[in-house]
Image (cartoon, rainbow, N blue to C red):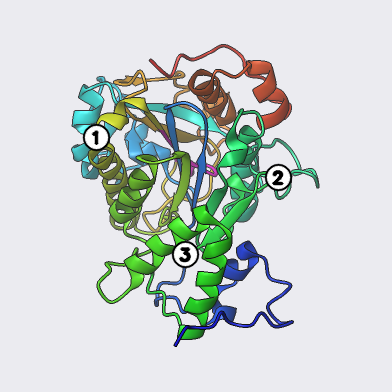
Amino acid sequence: MRRQRPAITEAHQPLSRRGFLGQSLALGCSLAAAPLVTPIALAGAPGENRLVVIILRGAMDGLDLLRPLGDPFLPELRPSLSDEGVGLDGHFALHPVLEGLLPLWQAGELAFVPATSTPYRDRRSHFDGQDHLEAGTAGALPPALARDGWLNRLLTLLPGVEGRTAFAVGRTRMLILEGEAPITQWTPGTELALSPQSQLLLSYLFEADPLFAEAGQTALKMSGPSGTGLVAQDAEGLAHFVAEQMQGATRIASFSLTGWDTHQAQARALPPALTQLQAALLGLRARLGPLWAQTTVMAMTEFGRTVRENGTGGTDHGTGGALLLAGGAIKGGRIIGGWPGLAENALYAGRDLMPLRDIRAYAGWALRDMFGLEASAIAATVFPGLDMEANPGLLL
């Protein structure tokens, strides 16, 4: 007997494909016990260059990721966080957990920008800081940009992207790719448990959108009885999934890693997050294969942390942080952008690393060189009001 298409009731009619899967609990989908589902945003673009933006949610401590062991003030400020590292250039050293990234540095596929941040200042709220980072704005978020991400605005400048609908993975917001360009949302794993009725309704949606069908069928395979699932904190799994998409039509991807809010016992709390970041980078490199040579990865966070460790061996919300760059397309093996020092009179507000340059300028120049855009268009549309300044020459 032929299976009948499920009736679309009044309760279903107001739901778009995006809203339907974005509110998965209302459709019988159940998430695993993990408190968050890592969002992923993917989009197509012209050309062969590939961009991955990793959002490090929670305020990653750039002074621990990239330890300035050559700064004479570091031991006094951080007595338990400054004793060793993987030497890079005689001044900076990687956190010991990141030793696996040394081959990328030696191959010119890894670089760092210390002392950079968004223009967000002083309030040090994770929510506001992440919104500014993903919206790419300065000052108060204008109403028109409050739900508009800079990667989405980038898509509006690129020719031919209309034929490739972007889609976001996960139940939480991924502001960086929200905006006028259409997005479809779904969740690949953390144990999708679909009732037969929900699967039929998904099949109906798949028929209406071939691109969505491809993504959705991948999600169902990954979460079925024989699938592996995609766990929220499995950074290597996330990287492999993104790399597989980039072997097809995807050219731009963004996903999040959490675990960076290290107020206490940072020596124990930070290594798991760093391990995940290293796994993501190495996973991308391994799975992309020859395409790694055309790939730029930017890992950025909402703000840095205080230069002084606190009484519990942790660090508190700060200002200046660090930008990590990776990929075969970058001019790596170097520290970019200068160093303000840790002397008290060099600190921001007497407590934080002083930002030397807007992180949006580095992202803007990378986009300009990757996609052949005018710097003026990036400053006007992608990062409104940004002073691009000189090109730092991030890419080959």
Q: Quadrant of the N terminus?
A: bottom left
Q: Residue at x 48, y 22 (%)?
A: 370
Q: Are marks 3 and 2 in contact (CB under 8 Å)?
A: no
Earlier in the chain: of badge 3 and badge 1, it is 3
Which residue, given by chain and number where applicable, does mark 1 sit on? 289
Give how far apart the Cα atoms at labels 1 and 2 are.
Answer: 33 Å
Question: Which mark is drawn over residue 67?
Answer: none
Identity of the amino acid at label 2? Glu
Do we see residue 387 in this rendering?
A: yes
Is 314 placed above or below 98 here? Answer: below
Q: Is residue 186 magenta?
A: no
Q: Nearer the viewer, residue 326 or 311?
A: 326
- Left or right side of 316 for 313: left
Q: Is residue 299 magenta?
A: yes
Earlier in the chain: of badge 1 and badge 2, it is 2
Extreme residue in the bottom direction: 1
Is 13 placed above or below 137 here? Answer: below
Which span of residues is magenta-colored? 297-307
Q: Residue at x 51, y 84 (%)?
A: 197
Q: Residue at x 40, y 72 (%)?
A: 34
Which residue, given by chain and number where applicable, does mark 3 sit on? 187
- Residue 389 quadrant: top right
Question: Picture coordinates of residue 362 (x, y %)?
Answer: 52, 25
Which residue, given by chain and number where applicable, does mark 2 sit on? 180
